[in-house]
Image: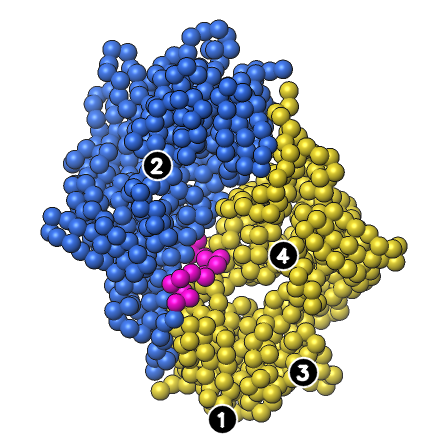
Chain colours: A yellow, B blue
């Protein structure tokens, strides 16, 4: 019987690990909670109705159809046993493994305030994206029906908490929708009066970027009409809005559409692993791994991607933490696969080394910031060419030729018309929609 | 103040009526329960993962963005008052009208057995389509996890109840998915072993078609591997399958995926109208209208589309019932608009006359049946050219250039690769998925 490799999670890390084991004489089982691999960097486009879900999600078993040593299972892992070398699925089924790669990723964290979740959804899954899309579009619909000026103003106030790449992308796109997509379609409100406010705890947006690019991003957000509040600490969120404090004092923003893009917490499988292996978790719940991505005392268990607190070990340099971005996860996936191959050959696993090709974020139409590492030193630029670079980089890395093509067509269309093709809400039922609302009689 | 025209429902009838009033000096309010106009003839493609939802659904207010006399409101009408000339929305708001067009359409009917609904979803809305897509794809996923041969066989049995156009399209596409799309992607099951059974109460499929075309459709279904049971009466449906009787006796089909394409019932707004106007409803709950589509004694209320039991009044011919197809609804919409214009000018409303351009249905790749009325008599054909004709007719009538283009690209891709791009399930939670299931250990 060939060695059994079990991979939990088919995000960027898990997918890359399975692919890198293509020519290795092992049986691979990939278990994921969903039936699709999600191209997360473009998920905000689904949330903002620019792309349809199938454009950025590919069925996992379709991706592996030609890789005969992979079996795909839809299932949720609830327990891991390091001694018995098994995992248990939610339905009670057990899977045995000789090598385990845990790539279960991360979810959003409300920093202990999970009671905020219903009022400020995060953006990690397609369901999250549909929920945000629904809230944004339904807020405009409710405003069109609303008679009371104050209530209308509150409905047209959109708040994004968190100024990382996702928060910046969401806020920029909300502003674009209000200013360019929707005007002309409403008769009782002017969507351009919508306010988009980005609330960030630190003193600048895009903290992982150099300071000059953070500043450019802030300028580009302002040009799009996004109000940015820096150094803000959120103190409460409810169904009517949120409170926060800044150096200027306390502020309350009435809003029916708050989006949470602030905190990330590792998958609860980290805790499960700690229970069975005694491994250490960091403050964000991530699993502290050995230089070769395995767990101390458990060389056959590797943790990769957002669930791993991993270090990059470049020869002759101090170890440096690996950032939580997709190239990091993919590189860890390849490293984990290579180390399994080495182990099977009786060789020594090698430490992980992260190659940093740079960092990019988009803000809206024609605006992005790019920070590339080149042999000649860092290359930094922003604006129109940064936006083109961002666009082609993302389309290039999309899984599968067809999706790339569909996405490119959708964007070309959106570019010329300002239209957003996916403005469709399957189920409009929501607190905002069901709440009683006065309605003026049809205007004369 | 200009006359207020209120249109309830923005399907084919309501949309066409509002458009036909473009140049008339009235204020139009279009109220719909959803935010999109749905191109229902292609909804089965969303249910079978061939198209994404935004490809066949256009935001209503986007369709009316340039028609300045239309206000779009998202809302559900719960009451109509013919004397006060108002309607009430679910949130309590009231809208006044001078002319009312009710185009609320139809829903599925379980012939008094609404308890079957959870086990056999119908196909009317995007939510329905997503639910069917989920059940079909999750049945294959559960089969891949299932150890027991009998349970596996039951999971791979798909039943469609109803042999009208929708039932035939669904059954044909299910067979195509099992035979062409999925093989090669599973490791423990062979999707080609899936059975698709079409259960129809009458002695033939596509009853609205001439008998020869019904026979051709039956042959084409058989060629695709669909088993057809004619003259079948369903006696029970539960979470494990369904029972029916035919001339050959009683039969039980174990299945976890039964789809209901059998019965149509008019919108409950028909009953509401009957209560306030005293109008007559037919057996299917449709509103019996006057020759000019208005209600007896209520010339300012018109009922069109699937909610209307309307007759076509061609000069010198007997009145004939209008079939429940989209050209019928669109023509009624234009007639209702024209009659409002006539009324405003002090002219007499004209009776409705239905122009029958024919009837077409597709069965699967390369198979369709077409029945066209031409001045030289009926033109009937089936097979490959019928399929091409069907395809271009549907793409042509899709609302909005962009959707047409996206759909054509999706189909071109699907045609060459047999791939279905929208095989994405946002939320896998389901009875089938959550039920305990044994799992064989990874095959050696």
Mark 1 — on which chain does it sit?
A
* Mark 4 or 1, nearer chain start: 4
Residue picked out by circle 2: B265
Q: Tag 3, which secondary structure?
A: loop
How far is mark 3 from mark 4, CA to CA? Answer: 41 Å
**Label 3 Cα crowd, 10 Å radius (few <14 / some 14-19 / many 20+):** some
Whether residue B221 is visible: no
Residue picked out by circle 4: A118
Relative to A388, residue B92 above or below: above
How far is mark 2 from mark 1, CA to CA? Answer: 69 Å
Residue picked out by circle 1: A346
Closer to viewer: mark 2 or mark 1: 2
**Label 2 Cα crowd, 10 Å radius (few <14 / some 14-19 / many 20+):** some
Q: Tag 4, which secondary structure?
A: helix
Whether residue B205 is visible: yes
Q: Tag 1, which secondary structure?
A: loop
Question: Which label belongs to residue A313?
Answer: 3
């Amino acid at each position: 019987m060939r060695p059994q490799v079990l991979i939990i999670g088919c995000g960027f890390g898990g997918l890359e690990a399975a692919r890198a084991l293509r020519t290795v004489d092992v049986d691979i089982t990939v278990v994921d909670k969903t039936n699709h691999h999600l191209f997360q960097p473009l998920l905000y486009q689904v949330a903002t109705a620019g792309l349809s879900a199938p454009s950025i999600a590919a069925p996992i078993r379709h991706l592996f159809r030609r890789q005969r040593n992979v079996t795909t299972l839809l299932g949720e892992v609830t327990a891991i046993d390091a001694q018995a070398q098994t995992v248990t699925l939610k339905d009670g089924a057990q899977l045995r493994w000789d090598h385990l790669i845990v790539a279960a990723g991360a979810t959003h964290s409300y920093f202990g305030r999970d009671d905020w979740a219903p009022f400020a959804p995060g953006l990690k899954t397609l369901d999250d994206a549909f929920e945000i899309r629904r809230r944004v579009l339904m807020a405009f619909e409710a405003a069109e029906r609303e008679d009371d000026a104050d209530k209308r103003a509150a409905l047209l106030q959109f708040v994004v908490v968190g100024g990382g790449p996702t928060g910046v992308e969401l806020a920029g796109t909300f502003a674009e929708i209000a200013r360019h997509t929707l005007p002309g379609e409403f008769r009782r409100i002017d969507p351009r009066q919508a306010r988009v406010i980005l609330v960030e705890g630190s003193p600048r947006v895009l903290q992982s970027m150099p300071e000059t690019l953070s500043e450019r991003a802030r300028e580009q957000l302002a040009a799009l009409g996004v109000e940015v509040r820096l150094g803000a600490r959120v103190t409460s969120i409810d169904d009517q809005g949120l409170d926060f404090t800044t150096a200027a004092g306390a502020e309350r923003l009435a809003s029916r559409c708050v989006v949470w893009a602030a905190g990330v917490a590792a998958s609860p499988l980290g805790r499960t692993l700690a229970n069975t292996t005694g491994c250490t978790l960091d403050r964000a719940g991530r699993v502290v791994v050995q230089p070769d991505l395995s767990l101390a005392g458990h060389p056959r268990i590797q943790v990769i991607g957002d669930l791993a607190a991993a270090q990059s070990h470049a020869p002759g340099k101090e170890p440096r933490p690996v950032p939580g971005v997709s190239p990091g996860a993919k590189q860890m996936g390849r490293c984990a696969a290579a180390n399994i191959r080495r182990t099977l050959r009786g060789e020594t696993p090698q430490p992980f080394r992260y190659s940093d090709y740079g960092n990019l974020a988009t803000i809206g139409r024609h605006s992005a910031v790019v920070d590339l590492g080149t042999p000649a030193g860092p290359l930094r630029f922003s604006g129109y060419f940064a936006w083109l670079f961002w666009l082609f980089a993302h389309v290039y890395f999309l899984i599968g030729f067809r999706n790339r093509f569909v996405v490119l067509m959708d964007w070309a269309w959106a570019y010329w018309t300002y239209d957003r093709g996916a403005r469709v809400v399957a189920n409009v039922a929501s607190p905002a929609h069901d709440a009683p609302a006065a309605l003026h009689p049809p205007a004369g």
